[in-house]
Image (tube, rainbow, N blue to C red):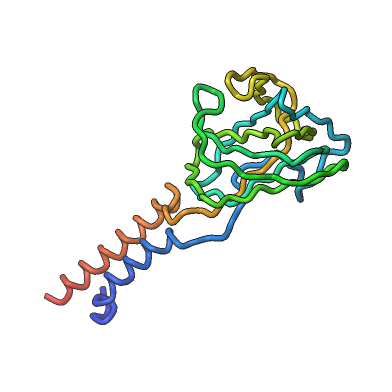
Amino acid sequence: MRSLPSSFARHLPAVALALLTAGGASASSITLASTFDAGLTFPAQPCCLSISNLQWVAVPFQPSVTATLDTADVGIGFVKGTGFLIDIDTNAGGAPGSLLETLPLPGISLIPFVGTGTSTLHPLLTAGTTYWLVLRPGSQSAGGWAQNDRGINGFVFSVNNGSTWLTTTQATPIFDINGTPTGVPEPSTLGMILIGVLVVTIAGRGCRLAAK
């Protein structure tokens, strides 16, 4: 069996490094969780949950990959006043816990629209971990949050400004979470990288043995 060229062997460390760093390449923003219909469209007959000083609503989500938060979209049925606020919270026993960031959602509209809150802190969201999106009113604001028609059910609501939360199995409101994946490879990608490094290492040892 012919050995690999010595010039290739000299470059094996660089090849291994390239394999390791390839899995951590930066990426653009992707959707991490969503209850929207395709294309951020509303249900044919959206029903709205009331959002006011008398009721806050929160939905759980689990990011599909580990990423830093970029934006959050919500399907608003209508809003009056100064607008809404989106809180991104950790999970605390099946309800919203510690605040990670508040995304302002200004706007006044009597027709359905997609409202986007933009992150400035870009907190890290870990794949498979439960977080909460809380929609609450700004000063002197009220409105409605449209619900999905995809058969996705469940959310929590509070009638005392988030002090306690009640659970319901009604249709989940429509929202999405978008973020930029981090440079940490997912487990399946990491496995492929390690296999590649192992193959390169074995080939390098074969070259050194053949040279002796």
To which quarter of the image does residue 131 belong?
top right
Residue 44 visible (yes or no): yes
Query: Looking at the picture, does residue 203 appear above or below residue 184?
Result: below
To which quarter of the image does residue 47 belong?
top right
Q: Is residue 23 left or right of residue 17?
A: right
Q: Is residue 212 left or right of residue 14?
A: left
Looking at the picture, how far across and down is residue 82, in whole percent? 75, 41
Count up the numbered dots. 0
Looking at the picture, how far across and down is residue 4, in whole percent? 27, 76
To which quarter of the image does residue 194 belong?
bottom left
Instruction: Quadrant for the C terminus, please.
Output: bottom left
Look at 76% across and 34% down and name the residue there: 141
Query: Looking at the picture, does residue 162 appear above or below residue 101?
Result: above
Observer-nearest of 141 and 128: 141
Looking at the picture, how far across and down is residue 120, in whole percent? 55, 52
Look at 62% across and 51% down and name the residue there: 118
Looking at the picture, how far across and down is residue 211, in whole percent? 15, 77
Observer-nearest of 156 and 85: 85
Residue 148 visible (yes or no): no
Query: Looking at the picture, does residue 152 appear above or below residue 207?
Result: above
